[in-house]
Image (cartoon, grey):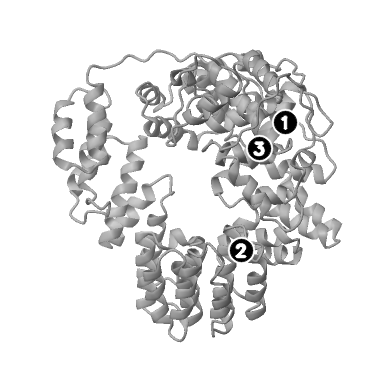
Amino acid sequence: MSKVSSYIPKIRANTIALTIAGILSSTTVLAKDTIYTAAPVLTTVTSHPQDGLFAQLRAASAANDVVRAAQLADQLSGYPLASYVAYYRLKPQLFNSDKSPNLNAPDGLIKEFLATYPNEALTDRMHNDYALVLGARQDWTAFRSVYAKFFLKDDMQLKCYEQMANAASGQNVVNATMQLLTESKHANARACQQLLSTLSKNGQLNTEQLNYFAALAAYTSGAQGQSLAAAAGGNASRMASLITQANGDSTGSLGGAVNNSGLSGQQAALANAYYGYSAARRSSNDAASFYRSAIAQDANLKLPDDVLGWQARSGMRVGDWGLVSNAIDKMSESEKSTAIWQYWRGRAFAAQGDKNAANQQYELAAKAFDFYGILAREALGRAVTLPADAPVPTEAELSAARATPGFERARKFQAMNMTLEYNREWNFPLRAMNDRQLLAASEYARRIGFLDRMVNTSDRTKSEFNFHQRYPTPYLSIMERRAGDAGITPAWAYGITRQESRFVQNAKSGANANGLMQIIPETAKIVARKIGLTGFTLDQLNNIDTNIQLGTAYLGQTKDSFGGSLPLASAGYNAGPGRPAQWRRGYMNSVDGAVFAENIPFTETRDYVKKTMSNMIFYHLILDGKAPSLTRIMGTVSP
């Protein structure tokens, strides 16, 4: 949830039961398994007298303060979290003050740590850190050895170092690098800059490839873009300069310069495509015309997936389904195989009159339990239902879950309000679990009061499901009453709450949003006045009833301000009501709600709307036994 709008309509005096699309009232039936309606009860974790010192060590390590970290670690010689004490002492020695890898990092101490604490989440973290050092040294033999032991493989810089290692061994890594660097922010990571510079200096990139990477890099780094453009020669420098300027062109004033750039062929096409990319991300209806120009200038133009994704969005925005098809067809196989692009490829086929091809794409997308999976099912004329419940975990499975290495450390970190470590310790062992083990771990999380871990753990299963774990209904009586007061359904309120906090009562965001429904203090004060909540103080935001009362009231007010549109209201709850109002005004014609949602320029809000809307459908199925049409709920958005 973000900043409150300067205008919030007065809440209705009389409670009105909301009807969604004329299909389903807000009458709620009891959830199938009432254990998931119970309030979580956190199990007690014993505090340690040195917990405060440990928190100081953690802060010193994060600040790369080698001396302070060593002093504090010496005082924690008997502390129970020994591996973390050792890690926080050592980590500042692996990185410089600017966070770059320290080429003189102590190899012996690092290897000693890895040998002393094998098979922990921190071991994998150290493999990540050490591999960054070895990659910066370009010690490819040692790098390969350590990187092979890094389980998560989620660090883009290490992926770029891996390609540098492959190139050093004589492999042609150009295509692999293109597939890897699909966004400008990746191209300009430190190691990825080194990779592109190395490929350029070694003459492994032809002119077409240099233009491609110069354009990719230039969008967020003029210096990196110009460096690669210099190697490409010709008018590549002009192309890179236009693309760098395009990223900062908030008014559209650069469009004429792009159209009259004096560039030709691939360079002109790249300049137009990236200007279209910039225009689409600022919700300009002109974006599609620049993408069309790019195609006209180079029909075989290669572009990164992210740029192609915005080409598809610009096409849907103006109803150019050929432009949508062109973008999706050019995406990497992994990208076009996601439910989002399977659904939109289906929509494009349908718009072009090919029903059979459309249905084939919808069938693929319908396998997903998400926003586009639901829309695809509806496009096929099928009712959305919950999958069959998996058998409940046995006592033996629960005992194994309870004994999972890392879970006890997770409990300790949760009690200390150290969210990063809490999530890391809980999530790391999940990656090796099968569905039965995940369901048991999820049930264990419920029993110790970790509803957020219950939801996230159950969400990982692939073929056995428990949607009551995934979509719990704690505080049901409160949610029903307060949602009714606000004139909204409990299903929508739960959908928002699940996305906001995963039911962590004292959750607090970096934007100072608080509690179950993540309410910002300024918003809380305004809403409290509107609904006549006398005596309200900010410390009440962590009171369950008050938090839900304010959150549901704000949802109801925001919904009313958007004429009852749940997608617009959901966007407003996340980004502030002013923003979706602005985005809506930018359209030339009415569009369906899914097109509006997919064109939201903020990645967080775009994902938020889609997730809260699909959450709501599943909550209707759990609470009511049936769900309204998501397609109808998304409705039409008009300027």
Q: How many marks?
A: 3
Q: Mark 2 Cα within 10 Å, few/some/many (few <14, many 20+)?
A: many
Mark sitting earlier along the chain (3/1): 1
The amino acid sitting under disc 2 is: Leu
Tell me the element at label 2: helix
Q: Say left or right for 40 vs 204.
A: right
Name the quadrant containing residue 353.
Answer: bottom right
Residue for badge 1: 387
Using the numbered discs, state the Cα–Cα distance from disc 3 to disc 1 in whole angstroms. 29 Å
Q: Which mark is residue 308?
A: 2
Label 2 with label 3: CB-CB less than 8 Å:
no
Name the quadrant containing residue 159.
Answer: bottom left
User: In front: mark 3 or mark 1?
Assistant: 3
Using the numbered discs, state the Cα–Cα distance from disc 2 to disc 3 in whole angstroms. 28 Å
Using the numbered discs, state the Cα–Cα distance from disc 1 to disc 2 in whole angstroms. 34 Å
The amino acid sitting under disc 3 is: Ala
Mark sitting earlier along the chain (2/3): 2
Q: In the picture shown, does residue 206 fall above or below 454?
A: below
Residue for badge 3: 569
Q: Which mark is residue 180?
A: none
User: In front: mark 1 or mark 2?
Assistant: 2
Work out whether residue 400 can be spotted: no
Q: In the picture shown, does residue 264 fall above or below 199?
A: below
Q: Position of residue 363 (x, y in %)?
A: 77, 48
Name the quadrant containing residue 554.
Answer: top right
